[in-house]
Image (cartoon, rainbow, N blue to C red):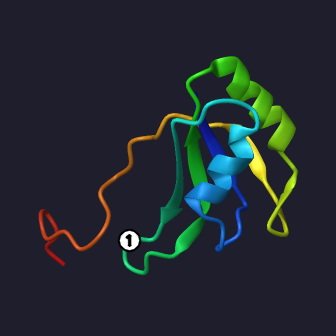
Amino acid sequence: MRIFVGNISFNTSDNDLRDAFAAHGDVESAQVVTDRETMRSRGFAFIEMPDTEAAKQAINSLNGTDLQGLALTVNEAKPREDRAPRGNSSSGNRW
C-alpha cells in the first residue's frame, strides 16, 4: 500500500520515515519528495508497505503524531491525477 505523509519537517530524511513506519511492519520504500531545482524537501513523502493491514495500522497510529516538531498528516495515497503540461512550451502558443 502506498501511504502519503504530509507536514514533515524539511530536515526529515527517508531513513527517519522508514524508522517511524518500520515499527508497524515491513517498509519497501520511504521517499521524501524534493524540489527538482533546489533538491530541498517539499514537506511531504510517500511510504510503500507490502502488508495492507500493517499499512492501515501505521496510518491510524502515526496520523497526528509528532515527528521532529510537526504533527504528521498520514493517509492512504490517492492515485496521481493527469495534469496539463507546465512550463514554457512553444507548441501552439503564438503570443
Residue 42 x %, y %: 56, 68
Residue that appears at 50% across and 34% down: 79
Q: Quadrant of residue 39?
A: bottom left
- Residue in view at x 66 percent, y 53 percent: 17
Element under disc 1: loop
Task: Answer with left or right where residue 29 lies relative to residue 53.
Answer: left
Q: Is residue 31 above or below residue 78?
A: below
Q: Residue at x 68, y 49 (%)?
A: 19
Closer to the camera in the image, 66 or 26 = 26
Q: Which residue is mark 1?
A: 36
- Identify the residue at image location x=85%, y=37%: 61
* Location of residue 15 with respect to 22 vertically, above or below: below
65, above or below 21, in the image: below
> Is 18 on the left or on the right of 40, as rendered?
right
| Image quarter of residue 55 | top right
Residue 1: x and y, percent? 57, 27
44 left or right of 91? right
Residue type, mark 1 in image: Arg
Query: Looking at the figure, which quarter contains the C terminus?
Result: bottom left
Q: Position of residue 48 (x, y in %)?
A: 55, 36
Residue 74, image x and y in percent? 74, 44
